[in-house]
Image (cartoon, helix red, strand yellow):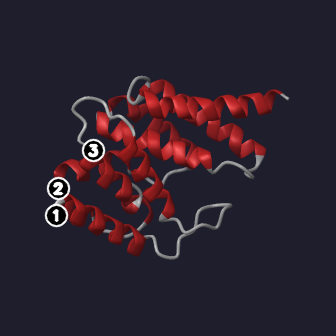
Amino acid sequence: MDYLAKVMRATHLAVTWHDGQKRKITDVPYVVHPLRVAEAVAQVELPEGVNREDCVLAAILHDTLEDTRLEPETILRDFGKDAYNIVLELTLDLGIPRALRIQKMIDRVPKMSAAAKVVKLADRLDNMRDMEGRDHLFVQRYCREARAILDAMRGACPPLEAEIERILEKHDAGAAV
């Protein structure tokens, strides 16, 4: 399967498996999020040695194992071990309390592959772009988490990091008022 066919297949799987899910607060179909994450990955300068195709595919599929019943073997079979491994690195255990889940992720990010770090940064950036209208305490908590993730991944993808920093500065300025 060529790259375009893989992107179309990944998009089809994401649309199918995220069907009926909505983004919190915005009520936008959830699948918009992984597609925006993939767009960010497709447009950013990647670190040397990071395969854009695998990153884009993983970005499209990054929440499927976490939020749907898609079988991991489908990702491995259809997109190969590299995209599959990135998705696995990004998948969180929703069976544990949120605070512990986030701490485990923060502890894990320094050990992630360069490709998984890029997708994680694009994921966090997209989520942060959706913070308008959210509860002030949620925004503060999410910004603290983003800062910890950013600090643990410093240098992984400077363009994405810079965009996250701009959003953090905006919210820090708003918190200081």
Would residue 36 be visible to someone looking at this image? yes
**Amino acid at pointer 3:** Arg
x then y, percent, for residue 81: 17, 51
x then y, percent, for residue 173: 76, 28
Q: Is residue 99 above or below residue 9?
A: above
Residue 166 image-quadrant placement: top right
- Residue reaching furthest right? 177
Query: What number is the disc on residue 77?
Result: 1
Between tags 2 and 3, which lies in front?
3
Q: Quadrant of the C terminus?
A: top right
* Disc 2/disc 3 C-alpha distance (Å): 14 Å
Question: CB atoms at circles 2 and 3 under 8 Å apart?
Answer: no
The residue lying at 39 percent from left, 39 percent from top is 44
Query: What number is the disc on residue 52?
Result: 3
> Mark 1 or mark 3, which is nearer the start of the sequence?
3
Residue tagged by mark 2? Answer: 80
x then y, percent, for residue 32: 50, 62
Decide if residue 100 is on the left or right side of residue 52: right
The residue lying at 33 percent from left, 41 percent from top is 116
